[in-house]
Image (cartoon, rainbow, N blue to C red):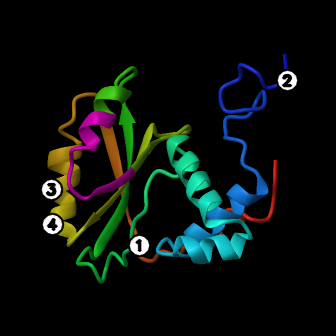
Amino acid sequence: MSANEGVEGGWPGRSASQLDGVDRAIIAELLRDGRISMRTLAERVHISRANVYARITRLMDDGVITGFTAELAPHKAGLGTSAYVSVTIEQNSWRTVSARLREIPYVEHFAMVGGDYDVLVLVRTPDNEVLRHVVLERIQDIPGIRATRTWLVFEEARGLGTEWAAREG
C-alpha cells in the first residue's frame, strides 16, 4: 500500500489535488487568458492538442477547473457599491444559512470562516439603498443568523495569487 493510497485528495495531511508541472502550466495559461485556443495553449505548454484536451477534461472531471467565466469591473457593470458583511450564526445552522445565501441576488461570494464571525459575505449592489435591502431584509431574515456587521469597500485590488507554473508537488 502506497503512502497516499486511500487518502482523499492525495498525500496524507494534504487536501489539495496533486497536479504535475504540465497541469500547473495549463492552469496558469487559462488564468491569464480563459479564451485561449487549444492550439495556442498546447504550443505554450509544449504538449499536443489532444493532450491539452485530455488534461483539461480530467481537470474538469476532478473538479480542479470548475468553469470558465468573464471577469467584470463591478463599478462599470452598474454595481457601484460593494461591501463585506460578517455574519454570526447559530450553532448547526450553516447548511440552512448557506442554502439561503445562494438564493439572494447581489451576493457574489461567501465563506465559512474561523474567528470572531462565522460567515463572510461579499455583496455587490447598484447603490447603498439596494445594499441596505440585501443586508437588512434578505440576509438578516435568514433563520439561524444572529448578527451582521457591514463594511463598505472603498477600493479593491487583485493580489498576485498563486504562481501555478512555478512549483510542482
Q: Is residue 62 visible?
A: yes
Of pointers 2 and 4, the one earlier in the residue sequence: 2
Point out which mark residue 51 bears: none
Of pointers 1 and 3, the one earlier in the residue sequence: 1
Amino acid at pointer 3: His
Q: SS of the residue at dot 1? A: loop
- Residue corresponding to mark 1: 71
- Residue corresponding to mark 4: 129
Comparing marks 4 and 1, which lies closer to the viewer? 1
Name the image quarter holding the N terminus: top right
- Label 1 packing within 10 angstroms: few (<14), some (14-19), many (20+): few
Labelled pair 4, 3 in contact (Cβ < 8 Å): yes
Q: Residue at x 21, y 48 (%)?
A: 104
CA–CA distance in space, label 1 to label 3 = 26 Å
Task: Classify residue 34 as left or right of residue 166.
Answer: left
On the image, the x and y values in percent for residue 38 come to 55, 70
Span of residues in magenta: 98-109
CA–CA distance in space, label 1 to label 2 = 40 Å
